[in-house]
Amino acid sequence: MKESENVIIFDIKSSGLTIEEVLKQNYGISGRLFRRLQKNQQIYLNSKMAKSNATVKKGDKVTIHMEDEVENSIPVDIPIDIIYEDLDFVILNKQPNIVVHPTKSHQDDTIANGVAYYFNKNNINKKVRFINRLDMGTSGVLVIAKNSFTHQQMSKQMEEGTIEKKYLAIVNGIVEKEEEIINLPIGKEENEPMIRSVMKNGQEAITKYKVIERLKEATLLEVEIETGRTHQIRVHMKHIGHPIIGDELYNESSELINRQALHAFEFKFIHPRTGAEKEINASLPDDMEALLLKLRA
């Protein structure tokens, strides 16, 4: 049986555990996903349908089958820049100034609509499951899972903090410290639901930065986030007095760039199917390259 978006095969390395134990303990499958697979009779032992309490031995193959699905987003032929794809992922270099997921004000002009169109065109009968989210004005690595197993495994890595996410940000002013860890909680403003701020009763938020280049009146930073709070980098940069250039929400608009100069350039994770470390990089978009040239002049 060949592996596909719908089929995951696990090679059993030792004897004595039940199928349920080996999938949960050795492969990190959640109880929720396991119960669904079990209910729908989607678990096989050596190509035969199996009960969850069946005992496995070294050399066995346990297979899980995932059903075809229908994506609810309207398929629209929106350009997407695919920088990596395999059985489990479609990974994009997201262009700036486009919303990721449909909202009340953006029903059919989002990345989700573009990916739904791509799935339809290529007979990928799956829902569009975003692993990470990027703000409308932020560009860079955007990871989409093709199946529920991959989505669950990546969510687990997110919760455990094993995924590394790095950004490039161009901020106002000359940042004096070569590097710093900002560990300040972020919460939602009472009267401004869109705006986040550093506040005592907020959620833990940890941002690391290091200086890549000091420009005339700005600084290029490499930023890594250990937590994924809404607008985290934008809020922390504003708090330390170096807001991101072009950020209309936490700074002001800029004549040099028509969005916040923030780009997700690196995403590092453990591939759920292979167990190998995977690093995805997204090249800097033209508008940020042009901004750097202007600031160096």
Image (cartoon, rainbow, N blue to C red):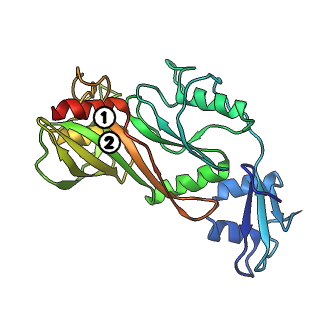
Q: Quadrant of residue 43?
A: bottom right
Give the class, few, some or many, for how many residues have Cα within 10 Å of label 2's Cα (few <14, many ≥20).
many
User: In the image, is residue 204 above or below residue 96?
Assistant: below
Of the pair 248 and 25, the residue shown nearer to us? 248
Q: Amino acid at mark 2?
A: Gln
Is disc 1 in contact with disc 2, using a CB cutoff of under 8 Å?
no
Amino acid, disc 1:
Glu
Spatial distance from mark 1 to mark 2, Cα to Cα? Answer: 23 Å
Residue at label 2? Answer: 232
Residue 11 rendering spot, x and y as whole percentages: 73, 71
Q: Residue at x 50, y 31 (%)?
A: 100
Q: Position of residue 152 (x, y in %)?
A: 60, 52
Mark 1 / mark 2, whichever is N-terminal: 2
Residue 109 visible in image? yes
**Residue 62 higher or lower than 69, as above or below:** below
- Between 186 and 276, the residue placed more toward the observer is 276
Mark in the foreground, 1 or 2: 1
Residue 71 falls left or right of residue 269:
right
**Which residue bears the numbered disc 1?**
289
Residue at (24, 35) in percent of width and height: 292
